Image (tube, grey):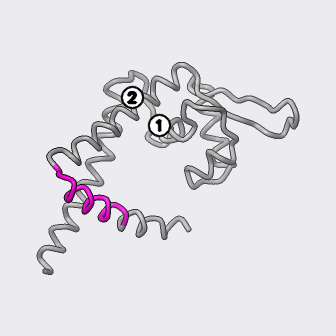
Amino acid sequence: MDKALDIINAELTGIFDNIIRAEAASVSNEYKEKLSMTEVHTIAAIGTGTLKSMGEVAKALHITVGTLTVAVSNLVKKGYVQRFKSEKDRRVVRVGLTKQGKEVYHIHEKFHTALTDALVKDLDNDDMEILVKILSNLDSFVAQFYD
């Protein structure tokens, strides 16, 4: 049993590291401008739907609004994000993606879809239920560090 746990630990560590590298490569291979993964994840958190408040995006990223403000300023300068002030309350700032930001968003989502497809390839319904339980256990463990 200890040997199996050692193998699982090594595999998880390797998979995590490789996913991070592959994710970065997927964006840089398809998109010419150099973006950090932090910037890509900020773009992903903003999304392509309705405008989001800075607080909503910061919460999704588990960072402070101050930290997000710096990141958004850089993405505005690079042309990926736009800021919009509320007409009702000028203190409220909402953010949305530009056309260029939406392109990066879709490249990033394409990677995540391919990753999920590869993970579930050749699994039957029973295997899928086990995988969902495994991922739920992993998510619960990781979530402890954010709470």
Local crowd at mark 1 within 10 Å, few (<14), some, or many (≥20)?
Answer: many
> Which amino acid type is shown beneath numbered disc 2?
Ile
Query: Which residue extends farthest front?
Result: 125
> Which mark, by number, is residue 133?
none
Q: Which residue is mark 2?
A: 107
- Give percent across and percent down for residue 97: 58, 27
- The image quadrant that residue 82 belongs to is top right
Tell me what residue is drawn at x 17 percent, y 52 percent: 124
Q: Quadrant of the N terminus?
A: bottom left
> Which amino acid type is shown beneath numbered disc 1?
Val
The question of residue 34 being in magenta is answered with no
Describe residue 89's horizontal placement relative to residue 66 as left or right: right
Task: Of the two numbered discs 1 and 2 on the same chain, state the one appearing first in sequence.
Answer: 1
Q: Is residue 64 above or below residue 99?
A: below
- The image quadrant that residue 73 belongs to is top right
- Give percent across and percent down for residue 93: 75, 37
- Mark nearest the camera among 1 and 2 is 2
Q: Is residue 59 above or below residue 84?
A: below
Tell me what residue is drawn at x 41 percent, y 69 percent: 141
State the CA–CA distance, disc 1 to disc 2. 10 Å
Q: Which residue is mark 1?
A: 40
Boundaries of the magenta span: 123-136
Q: Is residue 100 above or below residue 62?
A: above
